[in-house]
Amino acid sequence: MKITFMGAGSTVFARNVIGDCMCAEALRDSTFALYDIDAKRLEESRVILEAMRTTKGGYGKIECYLGVEQRKDALRGANFVINAIQVGLYDPCTIIDFEVPKKYGLRQTIGDTLGIGGIMRALRTIPVMHDFATDMAEVCPDALFLNYTNPMAMLSGYMQRYTPVKTVGLCHSVQTCSRDLLKELGMEDKLEGRKELIAGINHMAWLLEIMDKDGNDLYPEIKSRIDEKIADPEFYDKVRLEYIKHFGYYCTESSEHNAEYNMFYIKDKYPELIKKYNIPLDEYPRRCVKQIEGWKKEYEEMLANGVKDHERSHEYASRIMESIVTGDPYKIGGNVLNTGHLITNLPENACVEVPCLVDGYGVHPCHVGALPVQCAAMNMTNINVQLLTIEAAATRKKEHIYQAAMLDPHTASELDIDTIKKMVDDLIDAHGDYLPKYN
């Protein structure tokens, strides 16, 4: 079996996912094909993964492929393809995504999923993923594409609508959603045996049901505890608890993410909200710098002291592959096209995050039905931007980029239409060759 990792220079993530495969008897003897366009980072991943392979008994084989010229060979004959690329990296593209909007007074926290940062990230990533799909259709047409790259719904939605590649988008926020909520509210005693239902869109899927092991609804107790946490000046997950207050349900992704997915919290005319809700503006650039420095130190330590044994993580990828290979069923939260209206009050061409059953025949999304109307309405403010960004990538029409930005809730709550269009033009110019030409 062959498992190809696109963007293998993302060493920490490659180590986790491929390390997970090395922990699974059904996967450990695979050929692990590592692909990247950065020779240094690819070599770092090879060194670490070879050392891990040795600690795990020497099963399998690792192959490295560098650059566009070797991409098709990396994919040839693959059974599974894992995608973790970052087109344009932190420097220059993430810096551009934050600094250009900042000149117009538009502030962001993460900028990788929605907002103007998410739009630009999608537009520079989709052409690269389209090329992956073209190669896959030729050299591994039956492979399953496991996408981890953000913006999840835009990228997975494009692949699902405009390419023949079997694609599922994966995000670890589903696994940690209810656990984090119960822990932060001091309800750890309810963790064991809990039951939940989560559905919506990536980074804004809703915890629709949460019950203890005996089937008792936990939301009444949750709601009785949130005011005290929101009032705590040191507490940092306030936006999601505010969602419970005003929309009735908790959502999957962190408050620093969700603070920029709406028109409520980051507002130039209400600067006091930033402190009130502990919103970390410019968080992602800080995080990138810290991660780059942290990885350099960690890599040097591993070279000096050896690689510690890897314990299987909570990431879905290896579990999905193992389930398909063995036929043993496994449940995930997956990002899939809303075909057949899995969520009945969201559009069919939207990429939704719903429970999925995995078995020897692949990934099977489950029908959810209608979301609470207010939750669907919140999702639609994001889906509008996602669909227009995909449309821009598919048609290469600049007007759709303008429209995506104009309909983004945070951008539109801060800037007028003419300013939004000027900002988009400046961003396109600043990205240069990282973007295709738009007419």
Image (cartoon, rainbow, N blue to C red):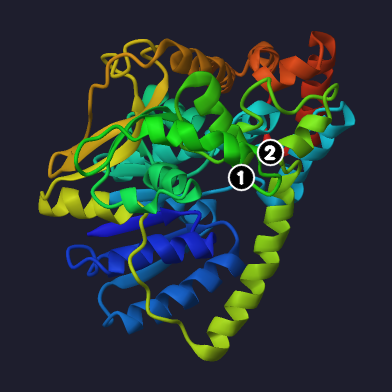
| Amino acid type, mark 1 | Val
Give me the residue at 17% from left, 48% from top: 324
SS state under label 1: loop
Can residue 158 be seen at all in this image of the molecule? yes
Residue bearing the label numbered 1:
87
Q: CA distance from mark 2 to mark 1?
A: 8 Å
Q: Quadrant of residue 16?
A: bottom left
| Amino acid type, mark 2 | Tyr
Seen from the viewer's position, the closer of residues 229 and 331 is 229
x, y percent for residue 175: 37, 46
Seen from the viewer's position, the closer of residues 249 and 324 is 249
- Circle 2 Cα neighbour tier, 10 Å, few/some/many (<14 / 14–19 / ≥20): many
Q: Earlier in the sequence, mark 2 or mark 1?
A: 1
In the image, 158: left or right of 104?
left
Relative to 382, say whether 193 is above or below: below
In the image, 351: left or right of 402?
left
SS state under label 2: helix
x, y percent for residue 68: 53, 51
Give me the residue at 45% from left, 62% from top: 14
- Circle 1 Cα neighbour tier, 10 Å, few/some/many (<14 / 14–19 / ≥20): many
- In the rendered image, the quadrant that contains the C terminus is top right
Count of marks placed on residues: 2
Relative to 93, say whether 428 is above or below: above
Relative to 317, say whether 426 is above or below: above
Mark toward the viewer: 2 or 1 = 1
Residue bearing the label numbered 2:
434
Give me the residue at 32% from left, 48% from top: 190
In the image, 355: left or right of 404?
left
Q: Quadrant of residue 346?
A: top left
Q: Are marks 2 and 1 in contact (CB under 8 Å)?
A: yes
Seen from the viewer's position, the closer of residues 27 and 268 is 268
- Outermost residue to the bottom: 305
